[in-house]
Amino acid sequence: MTILRIEENAPLDSCNTFGIAARAQQLLRVHSAAQLQALHESAELLQQGWLALGGGSNTIFTGDVRPLVLKLEIPGRSLVEETDRHWIVQAGAGENWHDFVAWTLDQGYPGLENLALIPGVVGSSPVQNIGAYGIELQDRFHALDAVDIETGRTFTLDAAQCGFGYRDSVFKHAPGRRGDHGLAGKAVITQVRFALPKQWKPELGYLDIQRKMEELGVTQPTARQVFDMVVAIRRAKLPDPAVTGNAGSFFKNPVVSPEQCRDIIAREPNIVHYPMPDGTVKLAAGWLIDACGWRGKSMGNAGVYPRQALVLVNRMGETGQRVTGGEVMTLARAIQTSVYERFGIRLETEPVVV
């Protein structure tokens, strides 16, 4: 029988990268799928519902948490299969994402280097379909294992079954909202597998990477060099959560039609935009926010990072007072209003607000 060790009134300050003070009424540190399977036999623990929490890098707490918090700490990383075209590598849901990317390169398995230094854990990566510098998780995804919390049943999903979209998957939709396939509030990911290409070629399409290559005098970078460049670029632009609390990119880059983009360019010729394979155009949310004058501005103990307007930060180091989730969301809504009034575009937030 699997024993579930529940922590009562557990602090969550160190469980979210924004550093927001909150407490969990009950918290379970999950180290195995068996613990999740056992939950369906403990109905009293789930009376208030449940919340899966990985690295807390994509979560904003607006108060204490009444649902049972499932803190994912499942370890493990290994090569599980090798084909003519791919190495299939697997990681436990609780593995730190950046450390896992570094490990794949150490083992000689390239393909995830553009996703270096993204905060969070492996189990959260398919939920958000994380992406950066021309690569999305779905481009390297093979399969995942998960547990249905209601029944205790384990199951496996391939890429098609995950319903990946831009920062989207079936794990972000409640059952019934996309047919009957939504898994939000229903299942928890325990293991993720990736297909890393043996015929690897670098993804160098982003301007920041091209500039870095020119700076270093590199024309044909190795996977390790791409990794190092991405790390350097992100560190120059983004605050370290260990020093300045933040949740990474706070808003999604909006996707518009070519007609909408042309209309905006006619008014704002310098807007940063990227054509997408399906014919739509992705706009740089950071540029839109910066154009509205928000860079470096603050409201209470929440602020906009001076080096990257897409990132909201905890100003505790400046004010001496810990930021609240309410302050963060007040600032976020003010930014959304400004961008909509100027550009007619509604910015969507990336973090989950609890």
Image (cartoon, rainbow, N blue to C red):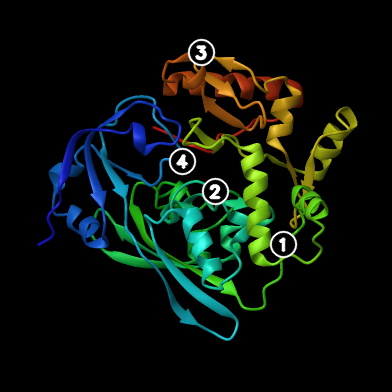
Q: Which residue is mark 1?
A: 203
**Which amino acid does the dot numbered 4 rest on?**
Ser
Label 3 – label 4 distance at C-alpha: 21 Å
Do residues under tags 2 and 1 come within 8 Å of each other at their CB atoms?
no
**Which amino acid does the dot numbered 2 rest on?**
Ile
Q: Earlier in the sequence, mark 2 or mark 3?
A: 2
Q: Which residue is mark 2?
A: 118
Do residues under tags 2 and 3 come within 8 Å of each other at their CB atoms?
no
- Give SS at disc 3: loop
Judge left or right: residue 132 versus residue 120.
right
Q: Which residue is mark 4?
A: 57
Q: Residue sitting at 63 percent across and 58 percent down?
A: 227
> Within 10 Å of the Cα at label 2, are there few (<14), some (14-19), or many (20+) other Cα atoms?
many
> Within 10 Å of the Cα at label 3, are there few (<14), some (14-19), or many (20+) other Cα atoms?
some
Label 2 – label 1 distance at C-alpha: 17 Å
- Give SS at disc 1: loop
Q: Earlier in the sequence, mark 3 or mark 1?
A: 1
Q: Residue sitting at 69 percent across and 55 percent down?
A: 134
Q: Position of residue 178 (x, y in %)?
A: 48, 51
Do residues under tags 1 and 4 come within 8 Å of each other at their CB atoms?
no
Q: Position of residue 275 (x, y in %)?
A: 79, 50
Residue 196 is at least partly visible in this image: yes
Q: Residue furthest left?
A: 1
**Which amino acid does the dot numbered 3 rest on?**
Gly
Q: Residue sitting at 83 percent across and 53 percent down?
A: 214
Q: Nearer the viewer, residue 288 or 231?
A: 231
Q: Earlier in the sequence, mark 4 or mark 2?
A: 4
Q: Nearer the viewer, residue 95 or 54?
A: 95
> Within 10 Å of the Cα at label 1, are there few (<14), some (14-19), or many (20+) other Cα atoms?
some
Q: Which residue is mark 3?
A: 300
Residue 217: quarter of image: bottom right
Label 2 – label 3 distance at C-alpha: 27 Å
